[in-house]
């Protein structure tokens, strides 16, 4: 059995122009599905199907083939039936698996499980769906509940299958026969039809500008997943502060220079020597789009309030003196030369200890939320 993977990538999108090659987190959108498909050990051949030759370079980069779609099947009025039929009439295969570039979070397991289900169950058509286990209506009428009865728990409702279209599979012979006899084949027509439930991020499909914003946010979250430790409210007061000048003052640091920043060259040693040893102070050195660095000096007994940062990791270099670092209720002493790294969502509190001032370099961002607990 010859299984072909096909990635359709029309370039004439109107809602989001050239969306298949628009950059998402610095990479062309289509590049995500190409990378994933390249790791799936289940295809005999893989094609990008597009009217634009520019995508042939991406196909070659992954060792895939490029199928030049005729212009008549690349218009806004062209259907999936038409360009898939054109492809099957020119490329020999037993089974065609279509994978959309607008679904960047599909996994290798999704693809391999989808293909295996189609083969093992001898399906003519397999359609990826998102099962919505919640009350649904069609033309204002209930589908999976009754208005005259109490609302059942959602987990007991009959799931409604919603097309994701991220993955579609057809036996080539059945597809072409359906096109000949019915004029359509996308939904399965005459044949053995199955459904493959997609879950989680694999159901995300990019069609609009808002979808791109959502996908960028997901990419950012995924990049920090390993550092994202869950935390929970445990009672008591809780509030958020973002304004760093007022935060520093509340922490007992009255003398703060936060605006004279981003000089090409500064001598931090000189700054520390020129400032008093018996009064708390801070001096911001860097304040860029990506991070900030502030020198903070406090005398024994002073420090900050217990807090955490929900969306940013930070770290400190201990330049002078000693600090008591309380992290998730556990206390430890850090001293000159130490570096302390703090994952987001970890509750911490810092207090200067010892016989003389303590100086630390705080590396974070100037707009990070402080959640005080």
Image: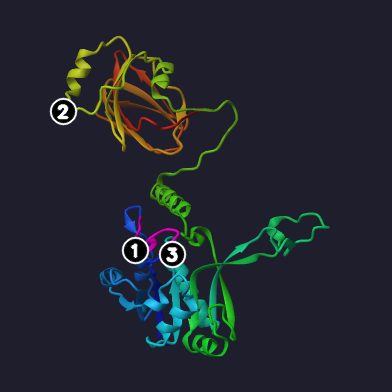
Per the image, the residue denoted by label 3 is 107
> Which type of secondary structure does the marked residue at label 2 adopt?
loop
Per the image, the residue denoted by label 2 is 265
Question: Magenta segment: does it hold 69?
Answer: no
Q: Quadrant of residue 163?
A: bottom right
> Which type of secondary structure does the marked residue at label 3 adopt?
loop
Range of magenta residues: 13-23
Crowding around mark 2 (Cα neighbors within 10 Å: few <14, some 14 to 19, many 20+) is few
> Is most of the magenta stretch helix, strand or loop?
loop
Q: Quadrant of residue 295?
A: top left
Q: Is residue 159 above or below residue 289?
A: below
Crowding around mark 3 (Cα neighbors within 10 Å: few <14, some 14 to 19, many 20+) is some
> Which type of secondary structure does the marked residue at label 1 adopt?
helix
Spot occupied by residue 126 in the image (x, y as percentages of width and height)? 54, 77
Crowding around mark 1 (Cα neighbors within 10 Å: few <14, some 14 to 19, many 20+) is some
The residue sitting at the right extreme is 148
Q: Is residue 211 left or right of residue 277?
A: right
């Amino acid at each position: 059995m010859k299984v072909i993977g096909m990635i359709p990538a029309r370039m004439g999108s109107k809602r989001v122009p050239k969306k298949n090659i628009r950059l998402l987190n610095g990479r062309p959108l289509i590049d995500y599905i190409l990378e994933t498909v390249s790791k799936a050990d289940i295809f005999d051949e893989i094609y990008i199907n597009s009217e634009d030759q520019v995508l042939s370079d991406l196909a070659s980069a992954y060792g895939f083939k490029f199928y030049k779609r005729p212009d008549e099947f690349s218009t806004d009025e062209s259907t999936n039936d038409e360009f898939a039929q054109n492809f099957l009439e020119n490329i020999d295969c037993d089974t065609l698996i279509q994978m959309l570039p607008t679904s960047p979070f599909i996994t290798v397991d999704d693809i391999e499980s989808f293909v295996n289900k189609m083969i093992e169950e001898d399906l003519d058509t397999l359609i990826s769906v998102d099962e919505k286990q919640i009350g649904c209506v069609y033309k204002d009428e209930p589908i999976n509940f009754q208005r005259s009865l109490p609302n059942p728990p959602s987990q007991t409702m009959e799931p409604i299958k919603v097309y994701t279209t991220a993955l579609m599979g057809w036996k080539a012979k059945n597809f072409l026969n359906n096109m000949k006899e019915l004029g359509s084949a996308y939904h399965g027509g005459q044949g053995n039809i199955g459904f493959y439930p997609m879950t989680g991020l694999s159901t995300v499909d990019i069609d609009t500008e808002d979808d791109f914003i959502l996908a960028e946010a997901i990419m950012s979250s995924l990049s920090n997943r390993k550092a994202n430790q869950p935390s929970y409210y445990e009672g008591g007061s809780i509030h958020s502060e973002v304004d760093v000048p007022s935060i520093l003052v509340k922490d007992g640091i009255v003398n703060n220079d936060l605006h004279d920043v981003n000089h090409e060259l500064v001598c931090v040693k000189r700054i520390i020597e020129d400032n008093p040893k018996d009064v708390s102070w801070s001096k911001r050195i860097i304040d860029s789009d990506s991070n900030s660095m502030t020198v903070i000096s406090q005398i024994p007994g002073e420090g900050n309030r217990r807090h955490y940062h929900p969306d940013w990791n930070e770290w400190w270099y201990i330049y002078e003196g000693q600090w008591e670092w309380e992290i998730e209720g556990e206390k430890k002493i850090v001293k000159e030369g130490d570096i302390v790294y703090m994952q987001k969502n970890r509750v911490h509190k810092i207090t200067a200890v010892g016989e003389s001032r303590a100086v630390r370099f705080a590396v974070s961002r100037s707009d990070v939320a402080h959640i005080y607990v």
